[in-house]
Image (cartoon, rainbow, N blue to C red):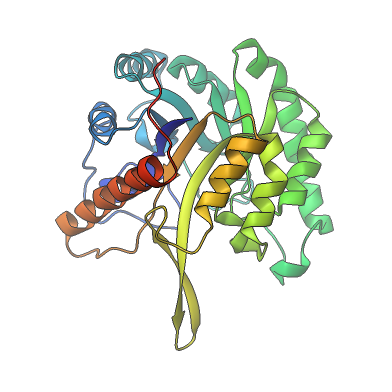
Amino acid sequence: MKLGLHTYSLNLHGIGQAWAGFTCPWPRQLSTFQLFDLLVDLDLEGVHLDDGVLERLDAVYLKEVGAAAKDAGLYLEYNFSMDRGGFGIGIQHDLRAAIQTAGHLGADIVKVGMELRRPRPVAASRFHPTVIEQMEKVAGLLAAAVPLAANQGIRLAVENHCDSFSEEILWLLDRVDSPVVGACIDTVNALHVTEDPMTAIERLAPRAFTNHFRDDRIEFQRWGFKLVGAAVGEGDIDMRRAYELFRDRSRMNRINIETELETPLDDMQTALDMEIDAIRRSVRYCREVLGIHRQDG
């Protein structure tokens, strides 16, 4: 498998997708082209690119970005959100426009975030009528976009993005019933809907096109607990088993590392250094512990 990076791992460098109402407290620290140089330095072979990374969305610029990635030997995947729940996530929300963006970039996968609104209690909301109503609309949009995606050689990967149970993702894929529509597995996100992440990974692996290879750690607090980001291999997700499921039960040939850390927001350099160090430790774990070695071609 090839090893790449989800750019949300560098959100404190100012290039992550807008998420959870967070605003970076300092200016952007990396251009898109500087990002590619960094990825090469980090011994990575590809990039799962948030829409927030791109300085512009015009075709000329996007083709320049795609050419630069190719020159650097990096595969490209495009990450965008439909933001169906109106949470203010990301920049580009129209699926057909996202496919066009990916086409100009030369990306072969578009990761689709739905961002559904769920009723509480979340644990009791699996296949809730209001959720199904939203997913039926998403299914219609995906089905309508299939000819455009297929024509451009692009596959659409729907993520379990903190808003859906794995069974619901499978229901959606069956509803659309297209070989160009599959899943994106985030190895942590199932926890956000109270689902066992390993169960979600196992269910979705055979239908997955791509992934966010992410590890979080559970920390107990006086008032309960919190889930905090960690370098891959340093949290509480069984990352070895996750990798084995990806390797043995899916058609995926890439691993996209994702890290997101609790960092100080009053010391920019410390925060930036923590992000880079977590990525380096994650790459080391993937290379040395999991045996994901660099591939040529």
Residue drawn at 63 percent across, 37 percent down: 248
Closest to the observer, 278 or 266 = 278
Residue drawn at 46 percent across, 16 percent down: 106
Quadrant housing the C terminus: top left
Classify residue 126 by image quadrant.
Answer: bottom right
Residue 247, x across and y down, in percent = 58, 36
Seen in the image, is 38 located left or right of residue 105? left
Classify residue 179 by image quadrant.
Answer: top right
Residue drawn at 43 percent across, 18 percent down: 105
Image vertical order of residue 229 relative to residue 99, above or below: below
Closest to the observer, 194 or 127 = 194
Closest to the observer, 140 or 165 = 165
Q: Could you tell me how many numbered marks the image carries?
A: 0
Seen in the image, is 251 located left or right of residue 54? right
Residue drawn at 35 percent across, 59 percent down: 261
Residue 41, x across and y down, in percent = 22, 32
Residue 204 visible somewhere in the drawing: yes
* Extreme-bottom residue of the structure: 222
Image vertical order of residue 149 relative to residue 176, above or below: above
Residue 37, x across and y down, in percent = 23, 28
Residue 246, x across and y down, in percent = 59, 39
Residue 91 visible somewhere in the drawing: no
Image vertical order of residue 285 relative to residue 105, above or below: below
Classify residue 125 by image quadrant.
Answer: bottom right
